[in-house]
Amino acid sequence: MNAEIVTAIENMGFIRTGASWAGRVGKYYWRVTDASGNETPIVVSTSLQVPADQNGLQGLLGSLKEEGKIAHFTLEETAAYLFLGPASDGQSVRDLLSRVTESLESMHAANVCERCDETSFVGFYTDGTNAHLLCQKCYQADEARIAEGKRKPNNYVLGYIASLVGALIGSIAWIALGAIGFYASIAGYAIAFCAFKGYGLVDGKKTVVGISLTIFNVVFALFFAEYVGLYISLLKEYPGLEIMTFVLATPALFSDMEFLRAILPSLGLGLLFAVLGTYGIVKNYLLLAKTAAHEKIEKMPV
Ligand SMILES: [Zn+2]
């Protein structure tokens, strides 16, 4: 979107959030989105309710397209998207908005909340990255949910235990696949998935500390699974090998260079698959934690 259009809509009171500008023309709220690189680099959209007859809106947008004011449009039950071509400038965007506003008024159209079908007291609220067209009730519900999340203390001990239990349950997949001589990143994913599931089941909050504890448990469960796998492979060679004998022999085994050299390739391969399997899920949760820490919703002055 060129600087001239940005200046034009900012002069109309539009405020930027992310790749969009949110603002109001007359009594209607609009979002102007920068879709640079597309054939239609500007998207003008809003959520609308047109009483009785949606055909009026369809007709209006159809004639705007015929006149070349918009490249094309998409009309959903309560949302309208107007796509503007690259030749648009500040003046044409301004003209389009005021013309559509006039027609909507004559159709008695109203903005509608993006989350419910409320049309009164609808306005733009921002979470810092996006502008949401909400009614007061939905805004208050969001505000209460965020405040409740921040107020509630986290029980890290319970979260730690739950994610450890989850990780150990997930490691069963790792041990079972390892026993038939098979490594797969999906088994690493199973461990991470079960660990985070366990943490979530006890309402563990998505904080960096909580997620770090869970990652610690995932790594622990991986080593545990590899250790059990080692016992199973030795059991194949020495049937009747008791667990206690194996455990007691562990320090001696792991200080034997030849033994270490023999197991390192499979341990390394296993850990590689573990990283591949867990990377995505861990990254997602860390992102969620980052967002949750700064979660907010506030009214935009438009
Ligand atoms: Zn609502």
Image: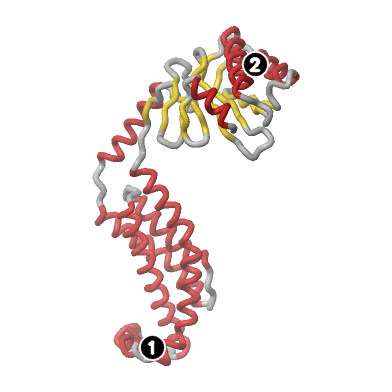
Give the colour scheme of this rendering: secondary structure
Q: Relative to 295, say whether 99 is above or below.
A: above
x 64%, y 24%: residue:
75
Question: Which residue sits furthest right?
Answer: 66
The residue wearing badge 2 is 57
User: Which quadrant, please, contains the N terminus?
Assistant: top right
Of 262 and 98, the residue lying toward us: 98
Nearer to us: label 1 or label 2: 2
- What amino acid type should be assigned to the residue bearing mark 2? Leu
- What amino acid type should be assigned to the residue bearing mark 1? Leu
x 61%, y 26%: residue:
81
- Name the image quarter holding residue 228: bottom left
The residue wearing badge 1 is 241
Of 105 and 160, the residue lying toward us: 105
Locate residue 35 relative to residue 160 in the image: left or right. right
Question: Which residue sits furthest top?
Answer: 106
